[in-house]
Amino acid sequence: MNENFTGIDKFGLDIESIVRFRAVSKKCMQERKAKGMSYKEVSNAIKFPQYRIKAVDNNSLREVRYPILIAYAKYLEISKWLNTWEKSNIQLSEKIKKTTIELVSEISKIR
């Protein structure tokens, strides 16, 4: 099974969400490549792990964290584009934010 489809029920994602987020993945990857940046360079610049940046580019919704997405878009200078996408995909954007908040909450309970 495709990695993108694992955990769909747990995170409240569906095929439509994965398809909709693909536009973000594609835009980020295209911009990063057009600027000739490696994942390591982006990671060093925005201070988030490479695997989280790759999650955005690879459309791995269950691994995407909202603060990283925002930092990545800002670094790539596509924040305005992302804001437009969010307005057109409000429910999915809210799911990504909510998932991030829930995971942080779960981590806090463990510590």
Image (tube, rainbow, N blue to C red):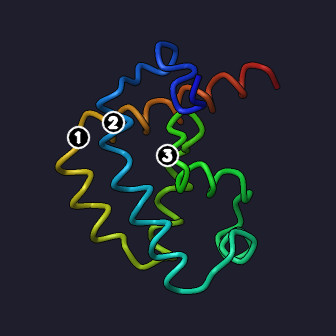
The residue pinned by badge 2 equals 94
Disc 3 to disc 1, C-alpha distance: 17 Å
Residue 76 location in percent, x, y? 48, 76
Q: Are marks 1 and 2 in contact (CB under 8 Å)?
A: yes
- Give the image quarter of residue 13: top left
Residue 49 location in percent, x, y? 74, 57
- Give the number of the mark in front: 3 or 1: 3
Taking the view exactly as shown, the residue that stands out farthest to the bottom is 35
User: Callout 1, which amino acid?
Assistant: Ile
Q: Are marks 3 and 1 in contact (CB under 8 Å)?
A: no
Q: Residue at x 25, y 55 (%)?
A: 85
Query: Please, what secondary structure does the residue beneath circle 1 have?
Result: helix
Disc 1 to disc 2, C-alpha distance: 6 Å
The residue pinned by badge 3 equals 59
Judge the density around disc 2: few (<14), some (14-19), many (≥20) Cα neighbours within 10 Å.
few
> Considering only order in the chain, which callout, 3 or 2, is on the residue closer to the N terminus?
3
Report whether 60 appears left or right of 25: right
User: Callout 2, which amino acid?
Assistant: Glu
Query: Please, what secondary structure does the residue beneath circle 2 have?
Result: helix
Q: Which mark is residue 90?
A: 1
Disc 2 to disc 3, C-alpha distance: 16 Å
Residue 87 location in percent, x, y? 19, 51
User: Callout 3, which amino acid?
Assistant: Asn
Query: Please, what secondary structure does the residue beneath circle 3 have?
Result: loop
Taking the view exactly as shown, the residue that stands out farthest to the top is 9
